[in-house]
């Protein structure tokens, strides 16, 4: 898990870039990337809502545009909606201006479909640079990265659970996916992981801007 700590070793703290939240307690923060997906996201939301677990959903503009007519039915009311860009193109393959335009396009779709604004952004693949960080700061957005990747898009349920059981720490921002790639896994692993974490005396909290993230 060396990569989990590289950012803390080599990079100074950056005001509007968050990898992990310092904790005195035992809080975890769930995030979901690459949705919405009409045949995956509703099941994920049902699991979370039934357990009263908050999460942040980093929405893909391309998915929003593709499935727009099906999306108003999704119940994100207990969760934070955030921006994951439009095309899922790594930021190092685009200019800062192109990335900003993707963010703005996705923000427009989120506003049109859900009548909500966003203050949180996660770059595709977690790739970013100083130009993007500065542009986000000017837009009063906070970049949310992660400290723990579930690998739900490539691992079986048992391996994911074993991995998370060993590596979760207080303050971890954990990435799952409500995407086509994880469709055969996420609905099975999510309730089991929630039960596992609660038995380990963790609790799940929101990364809502009012809790200190993405404040303008």
Image: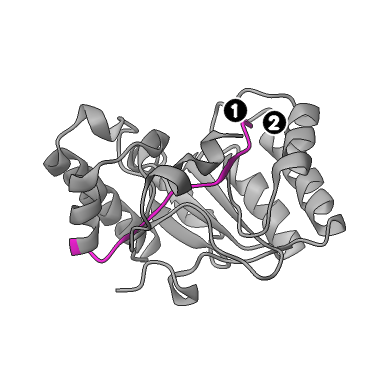
Instruction: Residue at 45% x, 45% y: name it.
Output: 9
- The quarter of the picture where the N terminus appears is top right
The reply to whether dot 1 and dot 2 touch (C-beta < 8 Å) is: yes
Instruction: Residue at 67% x, 37% y: name it.
Output: 186
In the image, residue 39 lies at what x, y percent? 59, 37
In the image, residue 192 lies at what x, y percent? 81, 44
Q: Is residue 69 visible?
A: yes
Q: Report the predominant secondary structure element of the magenta stretch.
A: loop
Mark 1 crowd level (few <14, some 14–19, many ≥20, 10 Å Cα) = some
Q: Is residue 23 above or below residue 101?
A: below
Q: Is residue 105 visible?
A: no
In the image, residue 102 lies at what x, y percent? 23, 43
- The quarter of the picture where the C terminus appears is bottom left
Q: Residue furthest front?
A: 9
Magenta-drawn segment:
138-153
User: Dot 1 lies on which element?
Assistant: loop
* Depth check, front residue: 17 or 6: 6
The colour scheme used to paint the residues is one colour
* Depth check, front residue: 74 or 165: 165
* Residue that badge 1 annotates: 153
Q: Is residue 145 left or right of residue 135?
A: right
In the image, residue 96 lies at what x, y percent? 16, 41
Q: Is residue 177 left or right of residue 210?
A: right
Mark 2 crowd level (few <14, some 14–19, many ≥20, 10 Å Cα) = some
* Depth check, front residue: 141 or 129: 129
User: Dot 2 lies on which element?
Assistant: loop
Q: Is residue 193 left or right of residue 108?
A: right
Disc marking residue 185: 2
Q: Is residue 162 above or below residue 192?
A: above
């Amino acid at each position: 898990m060396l990569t989990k700590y590289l950012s803390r070793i080599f990079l100074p703290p950056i005001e509007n870039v968050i990898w992990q939240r310092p904790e005195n307690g035992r809080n975890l923060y769930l995030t979901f990337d690459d949705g919405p997906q009409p045949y995956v996201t509703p099941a994920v939301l049902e699991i979370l809502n039934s357990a009263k677990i908050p999460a942040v959903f980093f929405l893909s503009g391309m998915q929003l545009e593709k499935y727009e007519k099906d999306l108003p039915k999704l119940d994100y009311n207990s969760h934070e909606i955030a921006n994951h860009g439009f095309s899922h193109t790594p930021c190092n393959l685009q200019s800062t201006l192109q990335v900003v335009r993707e963010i703005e396009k996705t923000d427009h779709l989120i506003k049109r479909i859900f009548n909500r604004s966003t203050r949180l952004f996660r770059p595709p693949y977690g790739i970013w640079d100083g130009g993007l960080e500065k542009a986000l700061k000017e837009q009063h957005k906070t970049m949310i990265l992660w400290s723990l990747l579930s690998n739900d898009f490539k691992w079986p349920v048992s391996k994911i659970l074993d991995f998370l059981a060993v590596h979760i720490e207080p303050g971890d921002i954990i990435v799952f996916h409500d995407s086509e790639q994880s469709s055969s896994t996420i609905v099975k692993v999510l309730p089991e992981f929630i039960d596992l974490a609660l038995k380990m005396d963790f609790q799940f909290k929101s990364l809502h801007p009012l809790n200190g993230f993405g404040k303008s």
